Image (tube, helix red, strand yellow):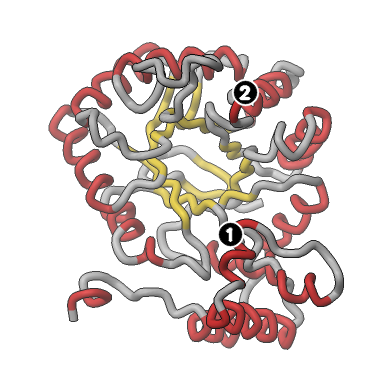
């Protein structure tokens, strides 16, 4: 496994991030523990979750699964850089409309971090991320709450998720005025088929020293060889991938992508991950395996060096928007 610094911090993290959103909804606790064991054995030290994972009446379940794994002992907690998120409404069932159980008020941040620590069965969270922008709460209030948690030793760093570039700037300029450390990472939708982050989000992250952590690196399976799998009678596309393939233009793009990789003997899913690892500012993509076999496939991407001919071909098929302001102004 390769490691890199998380943004401008001294913290070293693996180039692949273990996403845990499937733990609970798709993979039972025993299977989830087996995947975490395999990831740790392979050198992945960066685990990402969110307080809401498990969803609906089971929200919080994923953090509990991770907490039970950490509680098995050994050196699990010492070896893991643990990241979770705050924003979603975590009120008990039947109280979904009750105020102050969601978003980024100082009250909810305090409540949410204590609840996550209890479910995760640990005394601190390494990276505490704002899952979405809260337009009602000023960053002065957010940083005041975060600074207290840092002083208490409950969290070490703060990060953002799904922030536009101007909010990254606003957050870190406010932090600088307060003498706070500010955001150290941004978790965003970024992959070959969805490159809009390159216009503003990635440049802002690099300017302010944030590591970029792409989620949905296969764009919901669209970049994982979906057309070939359908042709061979395998699992059919669903969700975002199925919606995308309904467009004849996108289907043609994906077919060209699969044809290019077939020509070079490359696997689509591994190539999509390897491409992200070549992008400036990217710390590591989030992989969310449902099985140990899917984890093994993701691990191969770290060792994969894409030929220049392939990189050029990928840019031709999925050109991206280009840098701003040229992309929209000139």
Is residue 307 visible in the rendered image? The answer is: no
Given residues 51 and 277, the one toward you in this image is 51
**Left or right: where does residue 9 sit relative to residue 234?**
left
How many discs appear?
2
Residue 117: x, y in percent? 53, 16
Q: Are marks 1 and 2 in contact (CB under 8 Å)?
A: no
- Label 2 residue SS: helix
Residues at marks 1 and 2, CA–CA distance in whole angstroms = 24 Å
Q: Earlier in the sequence, mark 1 or mark 2?
A: 2
Which image quadrant for residue 252? bottom right
Report the residue at 35% width, 58% height from top: 202
Q: Is residue 58 above or below residue 133?
A: above
Q: Secondary structure at mark 1?
A: helix
> Is residue 158 shown left or right of residue 91?
left
Q: Which residue sits at x=58%, y=49%?
A: 286
Residue 240, label in figure:
1
- Left or right: where does residue 131 sit relative to residue 146? right
Residue that mark 2 sits on: 57
Q: Please state the horizontal and vertical placement of residue 31, each as a whole percent of the image.
A: 82, 35
Could you say which is closer to the camera, residue 177 or residue 131?
131
Q: Vertically, is 36 above or below 312?
A: above
Q: Is residue 4 above or below residue 78?
A: below
At 64% from the left and 38% from the top, the residue drawn is 20
Nearer the observer, 185 or 258: 258
């Amino acid at each position: 496994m390769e490691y890199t610094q998380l943004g401008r911090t001294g913290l070293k993290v693996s180039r692949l991030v273990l996403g845990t959103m499937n733990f609970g909804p798709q993979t039972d606790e025993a299977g989830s523990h087996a995947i975490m064991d395999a990831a740790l054995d392979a050198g992945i030290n960066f685990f990402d979750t969110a307080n809401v994972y498990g969803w609906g009446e089971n929200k919080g379940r994923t953090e509990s699964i991770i907490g039970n794994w950490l509680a098995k002992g050994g050196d699990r907690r010492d070896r893991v850089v643990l990241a979770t998120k705050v924003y979603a409404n975590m009120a008990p069932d039947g109280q979904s409309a009750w105020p102050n159980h969601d978003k980024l008020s100082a009250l909810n941040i305090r409540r949410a971090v204590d609840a996550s620590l209890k479910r995760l069965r640990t005394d601190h969270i390494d990276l505490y991320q704002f899952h979405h922008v809260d337009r009602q709460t000023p960053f002065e209030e957010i940083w005041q709450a975060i600074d207290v948690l840092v002083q208490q030793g409950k969290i070490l760093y703060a990060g953002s998720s799904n922030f536009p570039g101007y909010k990254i700037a606003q957050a870190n300029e406010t932090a600088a005025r307060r003498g706070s450390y500010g955001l150290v990472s941004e978790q965003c939708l970024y992959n070959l088929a969805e490159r809009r982050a390159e216009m503003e989000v990635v440049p802002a992250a690099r300017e302010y020293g944030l590591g970029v952590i792409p989620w949905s690196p296969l764009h919901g399976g669209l970049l994982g060889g979906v057309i070939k799998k359908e042709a061979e009678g395998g699992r059919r596309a669903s969700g975002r991938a199925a919606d995308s393939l309904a467009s004849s233009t996108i289907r043609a793009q994906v077919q060209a992508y699969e044809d290019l990789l077939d020509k070079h003997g490359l696997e689509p899913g591994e190539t999509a991950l390897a491409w992200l690892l070549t992008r400036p500012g990217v710390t590591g993509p989030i992989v969310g395996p449902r099985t140990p076999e899917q984890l093994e496939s993701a691990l191969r991407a770290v060792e994969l060096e894409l030929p220049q001919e392939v990189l050029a071909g990928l840019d031709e098929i999925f050109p991206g928007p280009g840098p701003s302001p040229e992309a929209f102004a000139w």
